[in-house]
Image (cartoon, grey):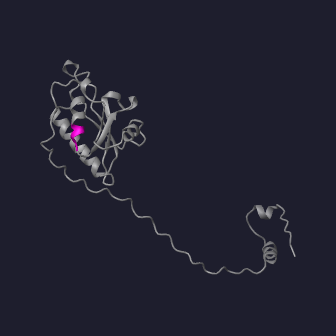
Amino acid sequence: MVYRVVVKKSAKIQSGKIEPDDAALFRAVIGEVKLLAEQDRITPIPSPCKPRLRPIATPPTMPDTLSDGCPDLTPRDTPTEFLGNGLSRMILRKLRRQNGPIQDRLDLHGLHTAAARKLLHQFLHEAAQREYRCVLVIHGKGMNSRGGKGILCKLSRHWLTQHPNVLGYCEAPPKEGGSGAVLVLLKTNSAS
C-alpha cells in the first residue's frame, strides 16, 4: 500500500512550528523506525605532518681542483651548453624545452669572482641536499662590466662544468634571462 502525502503550504508550516496532528500523520505514514546496525567504521586518522627537509649540512670546502679557467677566453668562447660524459643528448633537449619546473634560482649580478664562486658552490650544495633537479643560475651578460666582457658568465659556466653535482646546463629561455642565465640539471640521490 502506497500513501501519498500532500503537503499544503499553510501559515502553520511556514512559521516553523509543527502541529501535533501533522506529526502524528507523519509517524503513521512512515511506520515503525528501526535503527541501523552499528557499522564497522574506522575513525579517520589525521594525515601526518608534511615531511621536514633534512637539515642542510655545511658545504664542504671548495675543492682545489676547480680552476677559474683560462683568462684569455672571451664570453663568445664560453659554451652555451654542457652535458656530462655518458649522458644522452635527449636530457639536454628536455632541459632546453624546460620540461620540469625551475625549483630554485641564484642571482650572481654584481658579485666579485671569489664571492660568486663561493655562493654558487653553496647554492649547488643546498640544491643537492634538497634533491632539486633543475635550478636557474643568473650570471648576467656583462654589459656593465669593464670592457663589456662578461667575466661571471664565463667563470660560472666553467665552474658548473667542474662541479660534481652538475649533470649539464643550457642557456635559459629568453623569459628567464636568455644568454645571461643557465638552466642547470643536477644529480639527485636516485640519479647518482
Q: Is residue 161 magenta?
A: yes
Decide if residue 42 is on the left or right side of residue 126.
right
> Which residue is drawn at the image coordinates 75% and 62% (left, top)?
15
Label total for image: 0
> What residue is drawn where x is 24% and y is 38%?
161
Front residue (pair 130, 158):
158
Q: Quadrant of the N terminus?
A: bottom right
- Is residue 110 visible to the viewer in this orientation of the structure? no
- Nearer the observer, 164 or 14: 164
Q: As drawn, is 105 to the left or to the right of 145?
A: right
Main secondary structure type of the part rendered in magenta: helix
- Residue 147 sits above or below residue 111 on the image: above
Residue 186 highlighted magenta (yes or no): no
Is any part of residue 67 visible from this angle? yes
Q: In which quarter of the image is residue 29?
A: bottom right
Q: Nearer the viewer, residue 69 or 143?
A: 69
Which residue is drawn at the image coordinates 66% and 79% (left, top)? 36
Q: Which residue lies furthest to the front in this view?
A: 86
- Residue 22 spot, x, y in % from top left: 80, 72
Residue drawn where x is 28% and y is 25% of the image: 141
Q: Where is residue 155 in the image (x, y as percent from the top left)?
A: 21, 32
Q: In this view, does 33 lie above or below 53?
A: below
Of all residues, the one furthest to the left in this rendering is 64
The answer to whether 47 appears left or right of 8 in the picture is left
Q: Is residue 163 found left or right of 169 in the rendered image?
A: left
**The quarter of the displayed image where residue 28 is located:** bottom right
Query: In the rendering, at what x and y percent does residue 85 appear?
Result: 28, 42
Magenta span:
159-163
